[in-house]
Amino acid sequence: MSSEDRNTNLPKVLLALSVFAAAIIVYYVQRGDAVVADPSNVGRNLVCSSCQAEFKSPINLDDSGSAIACPKCGAAAGWPLQYCSACDLKFPPPLIGDPPRPAPMPQCPKCGSNKSVGAYVPEFFEAMKETGQ
């Protein structure tokens, strides 16, 4: 390789190195803002259909969809708590069928819509308030 070839390739090599260095800097800056979930706080927010107590239960992937035992009254009546973001209302899901199961698309008892209804996840709402959204 002649010195003339080295001189024409030098700007290309310097450009590639600077782009690589910038990518590394961006990666480390962005990585620092990541939110790390607390695994000790992971679970489902449930409500007992017998005594209306709210409690948290670990997520069990083998769960057959049956009710969870309530720690307050002991009844097997714990179901996932629902939340309507339009009304800012949390509510127990209506039960349907035999054996009873939560309705798959429950309607909000206040506004009657199911478009803004989902699982109640207080950690999500706290994070949204902290970021001002």
Image: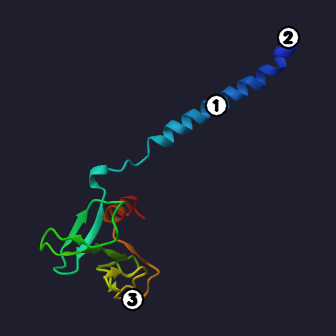
Residue 8: x %, y % from top left: 84, 20
Disc 1 target residue? 20
The answer to whether residue 83 is left or right of residue 67 is right
Tag 1 secondary structure: helix
Q: Image height check: is 110 above or below 125?
A: below
- Seen at 15% across and 68% down, the residue is 71
Please give the residue where the numbered disc 2 appears in the rendered image: 1
Foreground: 99 or 42? 99
Q: Label 3's element?
A: loop
The amino acid on which the numbered mark 2 sits, given as a three-letter code, is: Met
**How far apart are labels 2 and 3 at the CA level?**
77 Å
Q: Residue at x 28, y 74 (%)?
A: 79
Looking at this view, is 21 or 63 the one in front?
Answer: 63
Please determine whether, in this image, residue 112 is positioned above or below residue 121: below
The residue sitting at 44% across, 45% down in the picture is 33
- Residue 116 at x, y percent in the picture: 44, 78
- Of 40 and 66, nearer the camera is 66
Q: Quadrant of residue 23?
A: top right
The residue that mark 3 highlights is: 111
Residue 44, quarter of picture: bottom left
